[in-house]
Amino acid sequence: MRTENFITLTAPLRAVGGGRVWSLMISLFGDLAQEQGTAIDGPVLSAMMTLLEVKPEAARVALHRLRNDGWVSSDKVGRISRHSLTEKGRAESAAATPRIYSTPDDGSGGWQLVLLETAEDQTVARMGHLGFTPLAPRLFVGPADAVSPPGALSLPGTTAPDWLRAQLHAEPLVTAYANLARTLKKLAADLPESDTMTPLQIAVLRGLIVHNWRRLVLKNPPLPLILTDPDGPARQSHLMVADLLARFPRPSLRDLTT
């Protein structure tokens, strides 16, 4: 595909994901170079930034921030800089990978309602790490197989009323999912077959998809399908992300340098 056509085609996806270049770089590294010993060559990263219409100065600032924050390290092989995730960067990426690349839930999992004795300032964060979503200050819902804290009252979930589903989804996040679902639907219809795109274009496309999905799906613990709207934008976004990533398989780093 011609470069200008690719840039035009992916413009809506770049717009919906916001302009934080350092965050977009994390998505690119996490998708392409998460394994220990892998790295992205400087010329390859620059070429990807060009396809993303990121100015060289903005890319340098973002890379500098990631190095300062301990996410990325850089070294030189001859005259070429090579950039790789640090141990911290790989660990953070690996922790997020199951959520980002999970296949859509088939709805077979159950859910539970958990009541705590007390609630403190960090209760929501601690419960989130365990896989629970807040419903009220001491009341949480989560997957049936999530382990509730010691001393908590856990009740198996049955039928989920509509008001419960609505209360579990904040309106700004629903709107964000709707924007992403709409953008991905049009993109899926407009994209050509993968064999008409270069490996570099596919790498950038995947990075954009992962970036947009990552910034939403990691905001909250996963909810069992029964507690979501199966026809809602979050579910539709997940289905389209999974389909597009399968349709455009990850290229090897070696192919990006040829």
Image (cartoon, grey):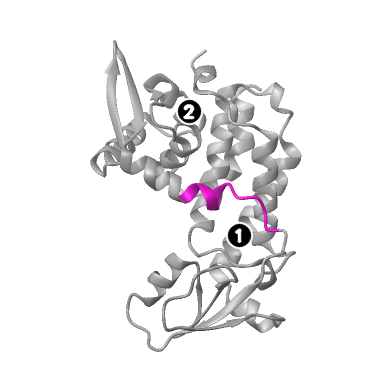
Q: Amino acid at mark 1?
A: Tyr
Q: Find the residue positioned furthest to the top.
A: 78
Front residue of 40 and 183: 40
Would residue 213 appear left or right of 93 to someone viewing this image? Answer: right
Front residue of 104 and 176: 104
Q: Amino acid at mark 2?
A: Met
Would residue 84 appear left or right of 196 to someone viewing this image? Answer: left
What residue did someone put label 2 on? 48
Q: Is residue 119 found inside the magenta-colored segment of the image?
A: no
Q: Residue at x 61, y 21 (%)?
A: 198
In the rendering, which numbered label is found on residue 160?
none
Q: Find the residue positioned furthest to the bottom.
A: 117
Q: Locate residue 190: give its quadrant.
A: top right
Q: Residue at x 67, y 40 (%)?
A: 244
> What stretch of residues is rendered in magenta?
96-105
Does residue 117 lie above or below 124 as drawn? below
Rendering coords of residue 1 (x, y %): 66, 22
In the rendering, which numbered label is found on residue 177?
1
Rendering coords of residue 203 (x, y %): 55, 30
Q: CA distance from mark 2 to mark 1?
A: 26 Å
Q: Is residue 104 found inside the magenta-colored segment of the image?
A: yes
**Residue density around tag 1, few if under 14, some if 14–19, many if 20 or more, within 10 Å:** many
Rendering coords of residue 49 (x, y %): 45, 30
Would residue 23 appear left or right of 243 to someone viewing this image? Answer: left
Q: Find the residue positioned furthest to the left.
A: 68
